[in-house]
Image (cartoon, grey):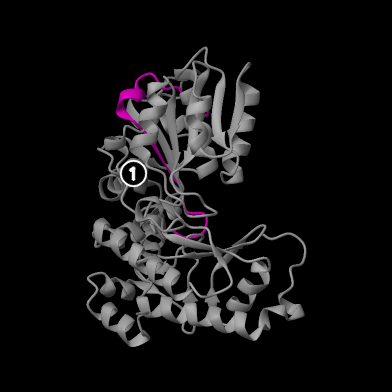
């Protein structure tokens, strides 16, 4: 029997993660199902930023590079993120730059680790920035060539002695499909290639085991499930076994072995810090640090269990609608979102937003709903599904003000 709202609220009251909802500043009258695009604001972030501004920058001034530990913030936050959410031993994750910049760095390093192999494999339907970076990097490597796959299922047909690197999204940003990282990485390694994983829709959505899966490199953003804020610094992972030989192409002074010697020639630092480039964005790192404090209060296994329960509930509550679910129902193949196909999905999403139910749309016809267990409740999911029923039944989405105009951003 489909659960009632009262039953959903009772389940929320018994939820071990329910108290963490109070850690977030959620606007009244809004049901937020778009944390897979931009996470909500943690309540402790403004105060933490204010302290960094007033004390570390305002009072400490340049002394804070040493006294407040700014120099080591990328590695320190990377280790915290790696230990709690990414399954990475210390010294393999740094928080820096953007996802695109970090992807350029790790793909460049990976290509150089596989000389004589020209093929860089990527999914045709990956998030576009992944393909743009792969294409741009290939143009800088004589002989290198991108090879586009229709899906990861095509890997075995194209993995050969020319494959250098395989770039895959752990969770498909459109459909929410989850790949088996360990099994796919094993297939890539069997062909002699390296595995680079995009974790933008994974980190903070489900537990990741980068070390156990044998991943070579990974990148991800800080502004979605991690709640680091718009434009939050991203992160990169470089397995310890590759670090001594890895040479990334953006050789800036923060990745230099002795940056304050001001040498004219570049020498890479030891370990993962060789993947740093320019001066760390201290205020952005501070915002992400406040969010990680909240994350460290949550058991990642409990987050995953609740994520699956929330998305199961939404799929159940919308099963009678004239929409096509494209997100896998199997738990082992599902991330933390549900995508529903509707020919007028853009207008439907706009009508929902007008009601205060915020999801998003991906062309040509996918309505996406993200499930963020730290601040989303079962009652929220019940109310969002009810709103979707009402929007579709009433036909209000047909109003001219919800029609798509120009390009979707």
Residue 190 vs residue 303, the one in the foreground: 190
Q: Which residues are magenta?
A: 228-251
Q: Position of residue 255 (x, y in %)?
A: 42, 30
Question: Residue at 37% of width from left, 85% of height from top?
Answer: 5
* Percent position of residue 44, x then y: 34, 68
Res 304 → quadrant = bottom left
Task: Tell me which residue sits at (32%, 32%) in the image.
Answer: 214
Residue 75 vs 194, above or below: the answer is below
Rendered residue at 34%/80% (across/down): 1
Determine whether the residue tagged by mark 1 lies in a helix, strand or loop.
helix
Nearer to me, 65 or 306: 306
Which quadrant of the structure image shows residue 8?
Answer: bottom left
| Residue 251 appears in the rendering | no
Q: Measured along the vertical axis of the image, is residue 282 above or below residue 4?
A: above
Give the main secondary structure of the magenta stretch.
loop
The magenta stretch spans residue 235: yes
As rendered, which of 57 and 38 lies closer to the eye?
38
Q: As drawn, is 146 to the left or to the right of 44?
A: right
Above-or-below relation of 196 to 178: above
Q: In the image, what residue occupies the spot 61% across and 63% down?
A: 361
In percent of width and height, residue 126 lies at: 56, 43
Q: Is 174 included in the stretch rendered in magenta?
A: no
Q: Is residue 346 left or right of residue 160?
A: right
Is residue 378 visible to us here? yes
Residue 166: image x %, image y %? 49, 30
């Amino acid at each position: 029997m489909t659960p009632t709202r009262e039953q959903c609220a009772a389940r929320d009251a018994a939820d071990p993660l329910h108290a963490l909802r109070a850690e977030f500043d959620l606007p009244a009258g809004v049901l937020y199902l778009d944390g897979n695009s931009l996470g909500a604001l943690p309540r402790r972030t403004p105060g933490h930023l204010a302290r960094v501004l007033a004390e570390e920058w305002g009072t400490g001034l340049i002394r804070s590079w040493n006294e407040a530990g700014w120099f080591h913030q990328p590695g320190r936050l990377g280790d915290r993120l790696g230990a709690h959410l990414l399954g990475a031993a210390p010294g393999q994750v740094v928080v820096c730059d953007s996802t695109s910049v970090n992807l350029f760095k790790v793909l460049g390093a990976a290509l150089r680790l596989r000389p004589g192999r020209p093929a860089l494999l990527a999914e045709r339907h990956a998030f576009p920035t992944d393909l743009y970076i792969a294409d741009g990097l290939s143009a800088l490597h004589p002989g290198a060539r991108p090879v586009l796959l229709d899906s990861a299922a095509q890997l075995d047909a194209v993995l050969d002695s020319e494959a250098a690197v395989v770039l895959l999204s752990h969770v498909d940003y459109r459909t929410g499909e989850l790949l088996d990282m360990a099994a796919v990485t094993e297939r890539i390694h069997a062909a002699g290639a390296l595995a680079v994983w995009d974790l933008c829709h994974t980190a903070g959505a489900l537990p990741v085991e980068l070390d156990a899966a044998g991943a070579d490199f990974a990148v991800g953003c800080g502004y979605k499930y991690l709640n680091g804020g718009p434009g939050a610094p991203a992160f990169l992972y470089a397995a310890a076994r590759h670090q001594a030989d890895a040479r990334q192409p953006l050789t800036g002074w923060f990745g230099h072995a002795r940056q304050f010697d001001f040498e004219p020639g570049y020498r890479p630092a030891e370990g993962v810090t060789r993947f740093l480039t320019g001066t760390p964005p201290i205020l952005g790192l501070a915002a992400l640090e406040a969010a990680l404090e909240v994350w460290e209060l949550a058991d990642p296994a409990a987050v995953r269990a609740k994520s699956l329960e929330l998305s199961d509930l939404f799929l159940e509550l919308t099963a009678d609608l004239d929409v096509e679910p494209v997100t896998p129902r199997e738990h082992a193949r599902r991330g933390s979102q549900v995508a529903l196909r509707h020919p007028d999905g853009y207008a439907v999403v706009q009508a929902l937003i007008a009601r205060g139910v915020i999801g998003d749309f991906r062309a040509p016809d996918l309505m996406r709903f993200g499930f963020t267990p730290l601040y989303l409740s079962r009652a929220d999911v019940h109310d969002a599904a009810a709103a979707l029923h009402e929007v579709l039944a009433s036909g209000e989405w047909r109003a001219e003000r919800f029609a798509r105009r120009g390009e979707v951003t």
